Image (cartoon, grey):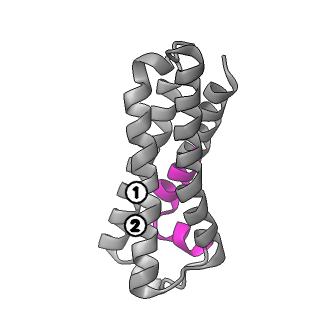
Amino acid sequence: MTIFQWTLRIMGSVIILIALGHTTLGPFSEVLLGSNISEASMLDPTVDSQNRFYGTVFSLFGVLLILCSRNLLANKTILYCVFWVFFAGGTARLVSIGSVGFPPLLVNILTGIELILPLILIVWLRALETKYGAVDT
């Protein structure tokens, strides 16, 4: 197994753990990120439901990274899609910053990761394709 495949598996596992946190903690997970969400908002059924739903759906990124790491050649199109959607999530945070201001430091750090890491992974996967002609590791 290559370093790239291990990287995908580790990332996938971390994402699943983060998603599990959002799913189990609901809006309280936002407080852990530094949000000033009110107690009333934390107890709002819609906010709670949305947070747990999006947390669970976020786990799909982790699942796909782990599954796709098994056969990079067969799954490279899915990987590129995952990387670009993850990057799009980071750009959506930039829209939020422009619309309502900067979030807490931890979320700003996540924004940087979401904007930089997918691009690194795209370049890395393309380099593997160039080096091996295909990435059938």
Q: Which mark is residue 126?
A: none
| Residue 4 position within the rendered picture, expressed as x and y whole percent measured from the top left | 64, 29
Please identify the quadrant where the C terminus is shown: top right
Q: How many marks?
A: 2
Asked if marks 2 and 1 touch (Cβ < 8 Å), the reply is yes
Q: Which residue is mark 2?
A: 92
Vertical order, 69 against 19 (above or below)? above
| Residue at image location 37% in from the left, 29% down from the top | 77
Query: Spatial distance from mark 2 to mark 1, Cα to Cα?
Result: 6 Å
- Disc 1 residue crowd, few under 14, some 14–19, many 20+, Cα 10 Å: some
Q: Which mark is residue 88?
A: 1
Q: Residue furthest right?
A: 3
Badge 1 element: helix
Viewer can see residue 12: no
| Residue 127 position within the rendered picture, expressed as x and y whole percent measured from the top left | 58, 29
| Residue 37 position within the rendered picture, expressed as x and y whole percent measured from the top left | 49, 83
- Disc 2 residue crowd, few under 14, some 14–19, many 20+, Cα 10 Å: few
Please identify the quadrant where the N terminus is shown: top right
Q: Which residues are magenta?
A: 17-33
| Residue 110 position within the rendered picture, expressed as x and y whole percent measured from the top left | 59, 63
Quadrant hosting residue 43: bottom left
Q: Main secondary structure of the magenta part?
A: helix
Q: Which amino acid does the dot numbered 2 rest on?
A: Ala
Depth order, front residue of 9/55: 9
| Residue at image location 45% in from the left, 69% down from the top | 93
Vertical order, 69 against 42 (above or below)? above
Q: Which amino acid does the dot numbered 1 rest on?
A: Ala
